[in-house]
Amino acid sequence: MTGILARILPITDFYLFQSDVQQIDTISYDVKTLSTLLDELIEERATDDPSRYRQRLDVLLGRYRQLLNSIDEASQRCTVVIPAKMIHENSLQLNTSLENISNAPMNFRDLSDVRTAVQGQIRVCDVLENFSHQINELVTRGNELIRQPMVPKYVQHDIQNIQKLYNEKIRSAQDHLEKFKRLLELWERFDANKRRYQQQTERLNNELVQLKSNQKSIISFQHEIDNCQHLRASYTDLKLILDENTQYLQTISSNNLLPYENLQKLKIDYDNMVEDLTEKLRIIDEFLQDLIHDNNKWTHFNDELKRLETLFREIGSMFDAKMFGERALEEKQQILE
């Protein structure tokens, strides 16, 4: 029996338990001895000459009183030791159960994994909350027992340890849950912005392709320039989406909401969007400059054309035979020159 107990319990707990068992064995032995003494006392008192056995009687009465005191002391100790031992065993069981409860892992491939982690962490909090009644009951029993004399010191130690562990588990679980919820909120916003960016860039890219396809059949350069500037402004507005995602990434990073590897994946998505927008703005700026340059050339050509038309009309009117003949001699010489 002792060998089995020694293997189940730590050595210090085993010695405490062995001492408690010895107390119970002592009570059992003393009660049996008391019964034998009572039989002997009855036998002594039943004799015709009690004085003859006075010395024997005094010895038996002394042993009787000693046994009563021993039984009383052992009984009082057992009323403390047994509940103390039960509290100790319960605290060990609760400690093992609590240690086996782990928070949801922080390793996410995508947004779906974060949602799964939030649900898993909610279940962890619920499981811990279910231990609340057992913990409170154990602490109450322990505090009541501590007020009694002869209470083993390990009772207070057990109560303090189980309270500390439970509070740490609750705090850690709630912190992780709040962390996961905050991460889920930020990641959902980041992902929504990513989808918005993709949808808007797809529309704007189609407009840019259409704008460039009209380059060889432009009717009004100014109209095309206006369209191009409007399109560039629409691309520029996309920076607001990227600025929001920058803030989300900074919040995730500064609060350590994601492991480094997962954070890098989001940063790669962000960098790709920035690179794509930068390239589109470069293309549209080049196209806009080409339009402005062509428009300037076209305007200059039209201006020159109008000037020549005016000049030709003036020359034609100058050489009109009737009008030429009516001019003064000096004016005719100037025209001919």
Image (cartoon, grey):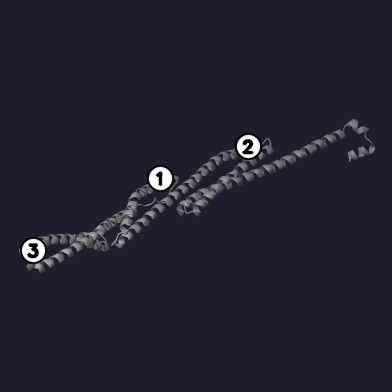
Please name the residue shown 60% across and 43% down the image: 237
Check disc 2: other Cα within 10 Å, few if <14, some if 14-19, many if 20+.
few
Res. 107 in view: no
Residue identifier under label 2:
214
Q: CA distance from mark 2 to mark 1?
A: 54 Å
CB within 8 Å, label 2 to label 1: no
Q: Which mark is residue 161?
A: none
Q: Quadrant of residue 310?
A: top right
CB within 8 Å, label 3 to label 1: no
Find numbered disc 1 in the image and state the secondary structure of the residue it sits on.
Answer: helix
Percent x, y of residue 319: 87, 34
Find numbered disc 3 in the image and state the secondary structure of the residue it sits on.
Answer: helix
Percent x, y of residue 118: 42, 46
Res. 223 in view: yes
Residue identifier under label 3:
44
> Considering the image in quadrants, where does the C terminus appear?
top right
Three-letter amino acid code at the position of disc 3: Glu
Three-letter amino acid code at the position of disc 2: Asn
N-term-proximal mark, 3 vs 2: 3
Three-letter amino acid code at the position of disc 1: Gln
Residue identifier under label 1:
119
Percent x, y of residue 75: 22, 59
User: Looking at the image, is 276 positioned above or below residue 25?
Assistant: above
Q: CA distance from mark 3 to mark 1?
A: 80 Å
N-term-proximal mark, 2 vs 1: 1
User: Looking at the image, is 143 positioned above or below residue 62?
Assistant: above
Percent x, y of residue 172: 41, 53
Check disc 3: other Cα within 10 Å, few if <14, some if 14-19, many if 20+.
some
Please name the residue shown 72% across and 42% down the image: 297
